[in-house]
Amino acid sequence: MQYAIDFGTSNTVVVRWNTITQRAEIVKLPGLSSLAELIPSLVYIKNLQQSEALVGQQVINEGLDIAHNPRFFSNFKRGIGSKIQGFLPELDGQNVTLETVGKFFLDSIIKKLDPEAQSLILTVPVDSFESYRNWLVDIHQSWNIKDISLLDEPTAAALGYQQNKARKILVFDFGGGTLDISIVDLHQGSNQKLGFLLSSNQKLKRAKIIAKFGTNLGGVDIDNWLFEYFHKTTNIARSSLTMFLVEKIKIKLSQSEQAEEFYFDSKNLETYDLQLNQSQYLQILEEHGFISTIKDSLEKVLAQASSNGLTKEEIEAVLLVGGSSQIPWVKDCLAQYFPREKIHRDHSLDAVAKGALSLGRKLEVDDFLYHSYGVRYWDRRKNQHSWHTLIKAGQTYPTEKPFELTLGASLPNQTTIELVIGEIGQDINSREVYLDQNQLVTRQLQSGSFQVQPLNDQDDTRAIAQLNPPGIPGTDRLKIEFQVDKERFLRISVEDIFTGETLTKDQIVVRVR
């Protein structure tokens, strides 16, 4: 049995391939799924030491989705693999990490799947760092599933829409936690037999990624902005119920000119009338740079596509994915770039998960590295560590020829040379995740700043070579070659220039993004 999971910030979708109908279908997991067949991305930790937790709809049914309860976690996906600003709670004598919370959540889903599940495809945001993917690789070791693959969410969505006539597709994936945009070229390959899922005369599909961009901005941020507005105008307190009402107002405003909800606070016997119209809604969004973020992100993707020989006029379909893509001004903003008849949003919630199953049906993906990769060095002028880029974002893989770096000893009689490799995030619209009153939210980084995540900055992984005889400052000693193979592993080869000896050949350092 073949499954795919679209692990979302607000909701998660599980699908499987039905070998009888030859179609992807949403799986409703007993106890975890809501009536809408979605799994709310919620976790309540009952006992951390004993690994006891409730997840999904279980949390809501038990009435445990209480905003300020330190055992309750929502929106935790956006913090996995990120450097969280703020303090996470301590439960049962242990510190809680969002990676642990995420593991509780996905483990609970996997336990509910068919015991005969043979393959699983997990989707990941475009802007996720390597640490997020590594986390997925680590936690799946305990799952009894033979084949597990990862696929970018917008690429999966392009396949999930099944636009048979459209080949060059822009996917605008705007969910609860991230905004991801990709331009994908779907085309046919040579005839070959693909097994029992596809007929022997069906062509192998290929998906070529032309451009992609992502940022930490989602529906959760909009909910927080709307709550801040109501808190200022009515002094309403934050709770699971008030946040639920705020989200309902947001959803209503996707189709109505005005939305209204009433809230009765039994503690102070106050009734709150929460009203918002389209004009006020737009003003709130503009105050937080919502429209400009969308336009900047689109411009970034279109510029990438242009440099790869594709104009926006050649894009045949624009597909809206994720609940936040239903916001009226999203389509209006996109209509400034594309004719409205090209814009579609009829499969916004399940396209990612259903499309991901195509990866298991012999889809080939031609992709490129989203982040840059470099080495850390000491900047004497700034008196701080900085980063020298070796492999730039946009590099296709496998690389045709290695990237070279020459190093020397920095100290007399040096016997070991260390090298810290880092993943360098985009420097446009960068947003960091921080914890504010048990809520994971984002904030814009200063212009020109970017995030870097070291990949091997541990005592037992920094050393790349032992020098014998010891090194002398002022002379080149090591020649290092970096290359990325077809599986996206970063490999290094190290040669001792002084002795002519090859110290390392094609050694895997990290899997890059």
Image: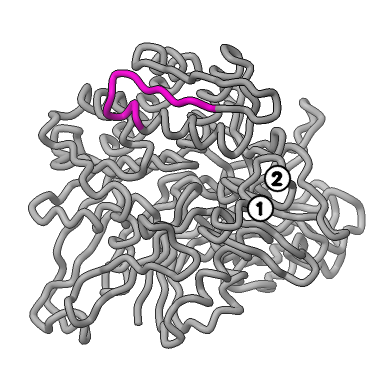
> Of residues 155 and 100, which is closer to you in this image?
100
Q: Quadrant of residue 433?
A: top right
Circle 1 Cα neighbour tier, 10 Å, few/some/many (<14 / 14–19 / ≥20): many
Residue position for label 2: 376
Question: In the rendered structure, which disc, 2 or 1, sits on the residue that comes first in sequence?
Answer: 2
Height in image: 120 above or below 249?
Answer: below
Name the spot of residue 318 as percent of width and height, x first: 21, 40
The percent coordinates of residue 151 (x first, y second) are 40, 61
Read off the magenta span: 252-263
**Residue at 53% across, 27% down:** 263
The x and y percentages for residue 196 are 21, 86
| 217 left or right of 367 in image | right
72 falls in the magenta region: no
Q: Based on the displayed image, in which of its 4 quarters is residue 211 positioned?
A: top left
Most foreground residue, 177 or 498: 177
Circle count = 2
Residue type at mark 1: give it.
Answer: Ile
Q: Name the residue rendered at 50%, 55% in the picture.
A: 513
Amino acid at circle 2: Arg
Residue 424 location (% of width, % of height): 58, 43
Instruction: State the residue at coordinates (21%, 52%).
Output: 185
Q: Quadrant of the N terminus?
A: bottom left
- Tell me: residue 348, above or below residue 235: below
Task: Give the CA separation, mark 2 to mark 1.
Answer: 6 Å
